[in-house]
Amino acid sequence: MGHTFTSHLYHVVFSTKGRLPLIKREVRDELHKYMCGVAKRHGARVIRINGTADHVHLLAIIKPATAVADFVRLLKTNSSKWLSETFAPMRVFEWQAGYSSFTLSESMADVVKRYIDGQEAHHRTRTFAEELKALLDRHGIAYDAAHYLD
């Protein structure tokens, strides 16, 4: 075959260190725009991004040559540095060490977009810990219930 065609669609989730509610509403939109810019500069495209004070969800298309771990590291490293330098109260901002990522087909993209869009309403009744556990279960990912949030 003379051409290569790919679609590597990921739902990525990560939280603030210790799930502290550090991402205030007045910072959130700027943070999301910044993260989209980082992704774009590295050849990825964020289709949806949203979150709450303690975590972020994004739906992104990542180039096949880019490992999802490298993509997430770029987002987290650049955005934590930017937050620390741009917003004085966030000088000690950190993301959690890990992340969760889930691949999906294009046919599921609209479902995940709606899910990401509804984060604020969703978290009126469910904590991040409950949400993450449900996502891991839904995707059949084994985890240690005592340490999956470390």
Image (tube, rainbow, N blue to C red):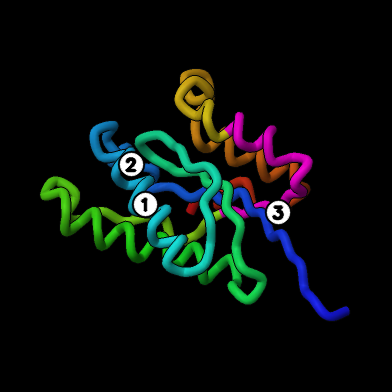
Residue 94: x, y in percent? Answer: 31, 56
The answer to whether 68 is drawn above or below residue 107 in the figure is below
Circle 3/circle 1 CB separation < 8 Å:
no
Magenta-colored stretch includes residue 1: no
Disc ID at residue 20: 2
Q: Observer-nearest residue: 44 or 16? A: 44
User: Residues under labels 3 and 1: Cα distance?
Assistant: 24 Å
Q: Is residue 94 left or right of residue 85?
A: right
Tell me the number on the disc at residue 84: none
- Residue 87 visible within the image: yes
| Highlighted magenta segment, given as a residue range | 100-115
Which residue is at 27% across, 35% downward? Answer: 24
Front one among 83 and 54: 83
Q: Is residue 134 in view from this perspective?
A: no
| Helix, strand or loop status at disc 2 | loop
What is the three-letter code of the residue carrying label 1?
Lys
Q: Mark 3, residues whose alpha carbon is within 10 Å: few (<14), some, or many (≥20)?
A: some
Mark 3 is on which residue type? Thr
In the image, which disc is placed on residue 17? 1
Residue 87: x and y in percent read: 16, 49
Residue that numbered label 3 is attached to: 103
Residue at (32% x, 37% y) in the render: 21
User: Which numbered mark, 3 or 2, is in the foreground of this view?
Assistant: 3
Asked whether, in this view, residue 105 is left or right of residue 83, the answer is right
Q: Main secondary structure of the magenta part?
A: helix
**SS class of the residue under badge 3?**
strand
